[in-house]
Structure formats: C-alpha cells, structure tokens
Amino acid sequence: MNQSTMESITAMLQEGHVIPYLGPGVLSLAESGKPLPGSHSALASCLTAKTAVPHKIRTNLTAAAQFIENFKHRKTVSNSMTEAFAGEAQPTALHTLLANMPAMPLIVHAWYDDLPQKALRGRSSWGMVQGVSQAEHYGNWVHYFHADGSRADEESADQPRDWKTMLYQPFGSVWPARNYLVSDSDFVEVLTEIDIQTPIPEQVQQLRRHRSFLFLGCRFSTQMERMFARQIMKRSSDKHWAVLPEEPTRNEALFLEQYNIERLAIPLAEFVSEIEQKQWVH
C-alpha cells in the first residue's frame, strides 16, 4: 500500500479532517471478553437462538427481527439485542487509537455495541446522538446523551453543540438507553425520510462538511449498508477511504467507484498498527 496515503490519512485524522465510520467488522479486533456479534448474520443467530423463526429468514437480520416483533413483541427483540451486546468486552486498539486523537469532532458508529463509549470515557467534553425506533419513540428520529448516559437537550445553548467529540450511532446502541433500529419496519421509517436528511442530526450534517470519511470494518454488500453510508456522507468531501481487505463484490466495487472511496486492501489490524506507528512521526 502507498505509504504516502497512510501518512496523509494519519495527518488528517490527527487534525480532525477525517471522520471514522465504524462497522461491525471492527469487533474482529477484540482480544478479550465475551465475543460480541460482529456481523449481521452473527447477530441474526443471537436473535433466533431462543425464538423459532422461518428457515428462509433466519440469517436475514432485519427480517428475523421483524418476525419476532410481529409474533412475539417489540420487547422480545429489544431484550434479545441487549443480551447479545451485554458482554464485558473492552475497547479494541482501534477504539483507543481514535479516542486518543488530539482532534476528533465526529465518529460514526454503525453497530450496536458500546465499545466506542467505553473508549471515549477518558476524553473531555463528548456526547452521543443515537437513532431511535419509531415503534418506541414515535415522532423522534434521535436522542442525545451526555457522556455519563443522561439525556441531553438538543436545544440547550451549551449542549450538545459545544461537545468537542460527537459519537453518532445511527442504529442506536446497547448503552445507555438500549434503543435499536433493527427490524424491517424500523428501517422503512428511516429510509422514507433519509433522502431529504430528516433523520440525520443537524450537527452531524454540519460536522461532515468538507471532511473525508474513513470506513473501517464496513461492507457495502447490501442496499441498506450502501444507502446509509451514502446519505451520511452526503455533502462532505469528494475523497474517502475504506479498509477492505476482502475482494469487493460487484455492487461494492461500483459503490466505491461512484463515491470516490479508495479501497485500502489490507487487514484492519495491519491498518491500525500502521496508523499507530505513523502518528508518533507526526
């Protein structure tokens, strides 16, 4: 891989010009604690372990969650999600690396674990904005939380606009309030509005301007994954990167080309190690 690219990414990360976009694959870096589901199929297995779901949708996360919601209860889905992510896993080297960056105005975390929150606890002045389900919070797209987990007031004069770091979790998270966007109906509600950016917080829209995105632990193999990435990075810089060691699918390759996302074909652990080494140089 081109070393000048790594040096450029490192410098831009340290200066706050790159927004990390973390996917479920980041959990592959975990070294200790109870393993957390690090893919859509792994999470689907957790949800269907105690609830009978038709075979044809057992590996389809959103469809399986919808079936359970329809024939059991929304609380059954929420409880299963909480159980899946309730382990005592610790932040990975990547989470710690990002939390220790001198400038980190925005981190996008497109999964349900709380490892970014755990890593950020040593950082001053930060907070969270998380997607919430219309099934549980009708009329609200997101909730804001302070670093201690208490609810924040979006309209307050000093919160959350003065946070030095905002953690944006569009699908919700196990902590602090156990809110999840996971079923088909959850995503239908969001996707009907996302093209006009309604579900995306105004602060996120402001922070992404003129900044590049760095996709880590992400795949773009499904339409939903591509749509969320596209809408969250809308009106940002025209140059982005994705650490993707696996050969991309045809749809992934087209997506990367269309949005000028340069593929870095190295393992995620190797990428993290490279950034750790180069940040000392800068």
Image (cartoon, rainbow, N blue to C red):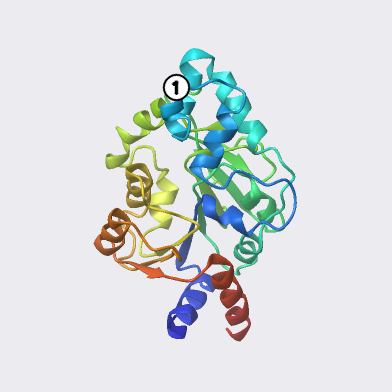
Q: Quadrant of the N terminus?
A: bottom left
**Label 1: how many Cα within 10 Å (few below 14, some 14–19, many 20+):** few
Q: Is residue 118 above or below residue 20?
A: above
Could you tell me which residue is drawn at 48 percent across and 71 percent down?
Answer: 266
Q: Quadrant of the C terminus?
A: bottom right
Could you tell me which residue is drawn at 35 percent across and 65 percent down?
Answer: 210
Q: Is residue 273 above or below residue 231?
A: below
Could you tell me which residue is drawn at 28 percent across and 57 percent down?
Answer: 250
Q: Position of residue 117 (x, y in %)?
A: 64, 49
Q: Amino acid at mark 1?
A: Tyr
Q: Position of residue 191 (x, y in %)?
A: 33, 35
Q: Nearer the viewer, residue 37 or 181?
A: 37
Q: Position of residue 26 (x, y in %)?
A: 56, 56
* Left or right of 274, for residue 7: left
* Left or right of 231, for residue 174: right
Which picture quadrant has residue 113? top right
Q: Nearer the viewer, residue 181 or 89?
A: 89
In this figure, which residue is indicated by the disc labeled 1? 138
Could you tell me which residue is drawn at 39 percent across and 63 percent down?
Answer: 247
Q: Is residue 176 above or below residue 105?
A: above
Q: Nearer the viewer, residue 139 or 278?
A: 278
Residue 156 in view, yes or no? no
Under circle 1, the secondary element is loop
